């Protein structure tokens, strides 16, 4: 019997979606599903929601729910982390303080000053989880869904023997979007995607073995509704020749080109028709709305009868990976792993997102080679900044954090070094109680 532990299980839908997928695999239908959260009310919702799935499918799975992390982790085979460090009243400052200085943020959970300070706070509870894994389930595999993905996974991989990889929706989500744009059945699509989380590139994208980039180009340049869906990413593709993962809103933060002036934000980050074109503080507004309405959403979700369609497998990687680790069919996915020469022109030891094959023996990362130089320039900078921020956290050095933020493309396009220093000091002052790794909180 496989034990699968969910840390941060109280998310509104995500835990249920992962469990639904897990239960579609015969090898996992008798699993122990151990749910843990620090919020008792949300944990109880998760327990009811997961139990409802188990009963609807008539599965022999066992559901546990606990506020005790050690109890949840004891003898686990796989651990999934979907945590959020602090309420919106804590992390809203990641977005609002940079905005005061002129850095306009859409999501702020991955890179830039907002993503870096989210990392600095989140690595502490993440390492608490990892230390407990070393104690209670040293042979378990950690599958992380928490952002900022690359910084967290890289920092964890530098400090533990626990096997860990990071999982994200953006690679498969974008590949499905591109297939839809060219009218291709998704099961006829193959691709090679590599880079870093939220900034990986489709180095190849093929339909029935043939290069599909000419069809993607035609769709973007000849169909306004396609161009308008992802204005930022489509502009990046037209300039660089390769399509990038993650939404336009996210990507508008990761470079110099779109968010440095109000007129550019209005032109490229406001009117897109995709799920996240790039409005200011999108994720903050989303979380505030969810926090205000989540109990009503819970009541509706629990009251809704489950159909056969509700029990069908989705496209999250985690269930396929767990099945493969337990001896089921091997599975290929894009995972976040250490760069052991996998991408030649990204920093050695940094966290990269590359194709990975998983089977009962574990993870087998696939060598990609070099990114095209037009993609590598931006990706090298992003990865280097992440590694410098990690160094700052590991060494308790706020100056390294300042220097990382000073090189952030968006920040540097709108602020002077003196202004960046002042902004960094204000972020440190605001969050000092959540940053015990730093003896000093000023640069």
Image (cartoon, helix red, strand yellow):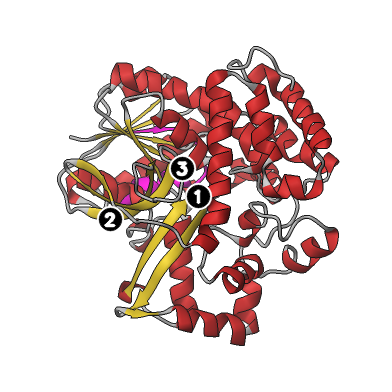
Q: For residue 130, which quarter of the picture?
A: top left
* Quarter that holds the C terminus: top right
Residue plotted at (46% across, 76% down): 180
**Residue 332, which numbered label?**
2
| CB-based contact (under 8 Å), mark 1 and mark 3 | no
Judge depth for marks 1 and 2 and give the one in front. Answer: 2
- Residue 234, above or below 37: below
Q: Position of residue 400 (x, y in %)?
A: 63, 27
Front position among marks 1 and 3: 3
In this view, which residue lies farthest toward the bottom? 222
Report the Cα–Cα distance between label 1 and label 2.
32 Å
| Mark 1 element type | helix
Stretch of the chain drawn in magenta? 5-21
In the image, farthest residue toward the top: 439
Relative to 13, is 369 on the left or the right?
Answer: left
Q: CA distance from mark 1 to mark 3?
A: 45 Å
Mark on residue 301? 1
- On screen, residue 134 versus residue 276, left or right, reads left
């Amino acid at each position: 019997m496989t034990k699968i532990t969910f840390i941060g299980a109280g998310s509104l839908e995500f835990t249920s979606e992962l469990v639904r997928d897990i239960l579609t695999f015969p090898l996992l239908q008798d699993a122990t599903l151990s749910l843990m959260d620090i919020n008792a009310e949300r944990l109880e919702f998760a327990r009811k929601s997961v139990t409802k799935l188990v009963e609807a499918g008539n599965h022999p799975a066992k559901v546990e729910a606990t506020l005790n992390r050690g109890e949840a982790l004891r003898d686990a085979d796989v651990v999934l982390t979907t945590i959020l460090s602090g309420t919106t009243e804590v992390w809203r400052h990641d977005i609002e303080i940079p905005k005061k200085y002129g850095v306009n943020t859409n999501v702020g959970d991955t890179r830039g000053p907002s993503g870096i300070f989210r990392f600095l706070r989140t690595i502490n509870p993440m390492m608490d989880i990892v230390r407990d894994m070393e104690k209670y389930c040293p042979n378990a595999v950690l599958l992380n869904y928490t952002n900022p993905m690359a910084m967290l996974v890289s920092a964890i991989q530098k400090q533990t023997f626990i096997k860990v990889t990071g999982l994200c929706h953006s690679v498969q989500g974008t590949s499905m979007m591109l297939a839809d744009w060219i009218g291709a059945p998704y099961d006829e699509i193959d691709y090679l995607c590599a880079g870093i989380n939220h900034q990986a590139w489709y180095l190849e994208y093929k339909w029935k073995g043939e290069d599909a980039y000419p069809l993607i180009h035609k769709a973007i340049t000849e169909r306004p509704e396609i161009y308008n869906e992802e204005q930022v990413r489509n502009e990046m593709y037209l300039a660089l020749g390769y399509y990038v993962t993650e939404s336009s809103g996210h990507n508008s933060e990761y470079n110099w080109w779109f968010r440095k002036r109000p007129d550019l934000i209005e032109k490229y980050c406001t009117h897109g028709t995709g799920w996240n074109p790039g409005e200011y503080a999108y994720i903050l507004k989303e979380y505030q709305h969810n926090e205000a309405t989540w109990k009503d959403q819970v009541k509706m979700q629990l009251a809704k009868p489950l159909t056969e369609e509700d029990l069908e497998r989705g496209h999250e990687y985690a269930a396929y990976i767990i099945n493969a680790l337990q001896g089921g069919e091997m599975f290929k996915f894009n995972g976040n792993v250490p760069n052991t020469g996998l991408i030649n022109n990204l920093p050695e030891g940094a966290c990269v997102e590359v194709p990975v094959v998983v089977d009962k023996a574990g993870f087998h990362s696939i060598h990609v080679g070099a990114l095209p130089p037009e993609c590598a320039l931006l990706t090298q900078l992003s990865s280097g900044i992440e590694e410098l921020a990690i160094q700052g956290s590991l060494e308790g050095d706020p100056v390294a954090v300042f220097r990382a933020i000073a090189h952030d493309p968006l920040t540097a396009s709108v602020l002077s070094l003196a202004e960046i220093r002042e902004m960094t000091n204000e972020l440190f002052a605001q969050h000092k109680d959540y940053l015990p790794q730093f003896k000093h909180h000023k640069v």
